[in-house]
Amino acid sequence: MGAQPIPGRVTAAAEGEVVVFMIGMRINKWRAVRHWLPTLGAMPRMLKELARDPDSGLLGYRALASSLGDRTIVQYWESREKLLAYAADQSKEHRPAWAAFNRRARGSEGSVGIWHETYVVPAGSYESIYVGMPAHGLGAACGTEPVARRGERAAQRFASS
């Protein structure tokens, strides 16, 4: 059944600003495999590349499937600068994947859609609690600690982030 729940009440051990980057794709035309399959395959390569580089700035991620053909990955980053540096680096997987997607998109008639959203969350603007859960979300990305260290109430945890 997967990872074991962490006993007790814990919170994410994140410090300071956190960048949340959400990226996804949607298959609009299932028969257009040649358009959506390369898009689907590009993200795992990027995530593996980032995971191998401890200085990349990627703290962690979680893949979500909201419906058949609709995929989202929530990523947690150290900083906006590190996210943007990765996106712009010609020697990394992202730039060639982005260029290839754009070439395919010109003739795909909307076969596949992609999107992203970036949120820079300042210190004091987030909090978390996990009860009976394995490491999850920001807690999986940054580690967890007992709730009591940051406060029993959400308002206290906001003040300590």
Image: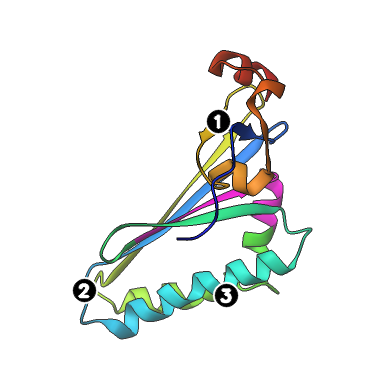
Q: In this rendering, would 18 be left or right of 129?
A: right
**For the residue marked with disc 1, what is the amino acid?**
Ser
Q: Quadrant of the C terminus?
A: top right
The image quadrant of residue 102 is: bottom left
Residue corresponding to mark 2: 29
Q: CA distance from mark 1 to mark 3?
A: 30 Å
Q: Badge 2, how many Cα within 10 Å: few under 14, some, many 20+?
A: some
In the image, is residue 74 above or below residue 52? above
Residue corresponding to mark 1: 128
- Magenta segment includes 74: yes
Camera-near label (1 vs 3) is 1
Q: In this rendering, would 32 be left or right of 139?
A: left
Camera-near label (3 vs 2) is 3
Q: Which mark is residue 43?
A: none
Residue corresponding to mark 3: 45
What's drawn in magenta, residue-wise? 71-85
- Mark 2 vs 1, N-terminal side: 2
Secondary structure, mark 2, is: loop
Q: CA distance from mark 2 to mark 1?
A: 38 Å
Residue 131 position, x and y percent, is 51, 34
Q: Residue at x 64, y 38 (%)?
A: 18
Residue 85 position, x and y percent, is 70, 57
Q: Residue at x 61, y 48 (%)?
A: 140
- Mark 3 vs 2, N-terminal side: 2
- Magenta segment includes 152: no
Secondary structure, mark 3, is: helix
